Image: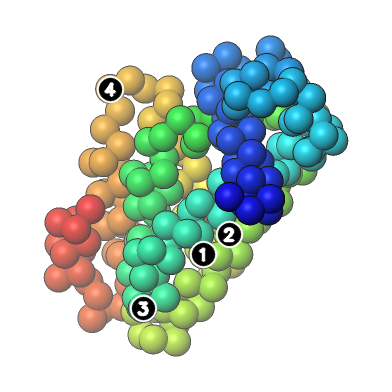
Amino acid sequence: MKQEDRRNRSTEKLIKAYLELAAEQGVASITFDSIGERAGYSRGLAFQKFGSKDGLLEAVINYLHDEVDQARTDSHSEDLCGLEAILLFCRIHLLRIGLGVEQKAYFVLLSSAVAEQSDVRNHFIRSHQRAEATLNVLFERGIKDGSIRKNTDTEQASILVGTQVLGLSIQSLVGSDFDLVAACNEFCRQIIRAYGTEDYQGVKAEAESKAI
C-alpha cells in the first residue's frame, strides 16, 4: 500500500472510530486517545492528523457528506430528472445512510452542539447549507426538465425538504417503534404532490412508493 493510501486509510479509520464512540458514549467522554485506541493506532495519531476537536469535527462532517455524494453517484443521480433525483436524495439520507451508526453519531454530535451553544454549531450550519444547495440544484434541474412546477420557490422548497429529512432522521432515533420506511414512502409521495408537474402525478407517486 502506498504511503498516501495508508494516510487516507488511517484518516478514515480514525473518523469511523470517532463516530462509533459518539454513537455509543456521547461526545463528552471522547478523547483523542480513545479515538486512536479504537482505530488501532497510537494514542497521539488523531491529534497529529486533525490538530483539534474542531478540526476533527469538520473532517467528520465532510466525510459524511462525501459518503452521501458517493451513494448518489453510485445510484446514477445525474441520469435522473430533477424530481426523481430529489426523491433519491431523500431515500439515501433516510434509508440507505440514515439507518447506520455514522448518521446516528451525526445527530448525537448535532444535539450536543445545540445543547451546549458551542461554536461548533457553525459546522452544522454549513453542513445543512451544503445539503440545501444540493437540493436547490435538483429543484432547478426539475424546473428545466419539466418534472418540477415552474412556480416552485426552489430555495424555500430546498429548506423545507432538507429540514423534513432532518426531522424524520431524528424521530427515527427517538422513537423505537417509528416506521422510517413508511414515513419515507409518504414523504416522497408528498414531495410529488407538492412539487411534481401533472405528468409526474399519480403514476409517479405509485412507482416511487414501490421503488423504495
Badge 1: few (under 14), some or many (20 or more) residues near its Cα, within 10 Å?
A: many
Which circle, 3 or 4, is nearer the viewer?
Answer: 3
CB under 8 Å between discs 2 and 1: yes
Give the labeled residue for mark 1: 135
Instruction: Name the one closer to the observer, 157 or 36.
Output: 36
Query: Circle 4 is placed at which residue position?
Result: 177
Q: Could you tell me how far apart the alpha carbons at marks 4 and 2 are, in whole angstroms?
A: 29 Å
Residue contact at pointers 3 and 1, CB within 8 angstroms: no
Q: Mark yes or no: residue 115 visible.
A: no
Task: Indicate whether 154 appears above or below 65.
Answer: below
Q: Secondary structure at mark 1?
A: helix
**Disc 1 residue type (three-letter):** Leu
Q: Which numbered mark, 2 or 3, is in the foreground of this view? A: 3
Residue type marked 2: Glu
Q: Secondary structure at mark 2?
A: helix
Query: Vertically, is 15 above or below 94?
Result: above
Task: State which tag comes first along the sequence, 4 or 2.
Answer: 2
Mark 4 neighbour class, 10 Å CA radius: few under 14, some 14 to 19, many 20 or more: few
- Earlier in the chain: of badge 3 and badge 4, it is 3
Q: Could you tell whether 3 is left or right of 166 in the image?
A: right
Q: CA distance from mark 1 to mark 4?
A: 29 Å
Name the secondary structure under disc 3: helix
Query: Where is mark 3, residue-wise?
Result: 79
Q: Is residue 4 left or right of residue 170?
A: right
Residue 185: x and y, percent?
25, 49
Question: What residue lies at 37% left-to-right and 36% top-to-bottom?
Answer: 99
